[in-house]
Amino acid sequence: MEHQKIEICEVCGAKDVLGFPVCSIFGAQTFACCEACLAVDKEPYRAIVNYISAAGHWPQDINPMYQREVRRQLKLHDIPEEVFKFEVERAIAEEQAAMIEYYKGKVDFNDCKTYF
Ligand SMILES: [Zn+2]
């Protein structure tokens, strides 16, 4: 695998290490990580939160295969599932708020009650 010195591992924050470009299993995103993170297929925590929050609510909207992988990742990051669930909900709420802000003045909200 192609590798080079990177300033920072995007997964664990290790600095000035040998880095590897990795494709996420959580959708179309790539990141650079160190050898230790690569060895266990550890992914950036923030990317997992973003991916799952775009797919739906945790865990009921997420298929069992991804649920298994997310739980494995949470263990690697030492993050309790309740914390993850909370952060997914917060990301969904932030995205909805950003959408409403974006459409303010562009659409008449009385016309789209079904969406908001
Ligand atoms: Zn790392």
Image (cartoon, rainbow, N blue to C red):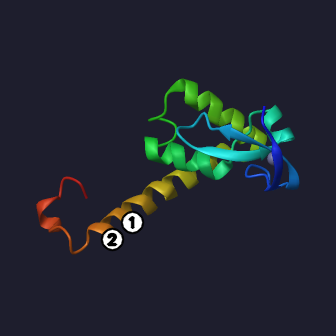
Which residue is farthest left? 111
The residue at the point 73 percent across, 47 percent down is 32
- Near-viewer residue (102 or 92): 102
| Residue 14 spot, x, y in % from top left | 85, 54
> Circle 2 sits on which residue?
101
Question: Among all residues in the image, which is located at the extreme top?
Answer: 65
Q: Answer few, some or many: residues within 10 Å of disc 2's Cα (few below 14, many 20 plus, some between 14 and 19).
A: few
Is residue 56 visible in the rendered image? The answer is no
Q: Residue at x 65, y 43 (%)?
A: 81
Q: Position of residue 26 (x, y in %)?
A: 57, 37
Q: Which residue is mark 1?
A: 98
Left-right relation of 110 to 90: left
Q: Mark 1 and mark 2 in contact? Answer it, CB < 8 Å.
A: yes
Name the kind of residue labelled 1 in the image.
Ala
Q: Helix, strand or loop at disc 1? A: helix
- What residue type is disc 2 on? Glu
Question: Whole-percent x and y of residue 86?
Answer: 56, 53
On the picture, is 37 further left or further right than 72? right
**Residue at 49% of width from left, 33% of height from top?**
62
- The answer to whether residue 105 is visible is yes
Neighbor class of circle 1 (other Cα within 10 Å; few <14, some 14-19, many 20+) is: few
Tell which of 72 and 83 is nearer to you. 72
Q: Is residue 93 above or below residue 48?
A: below
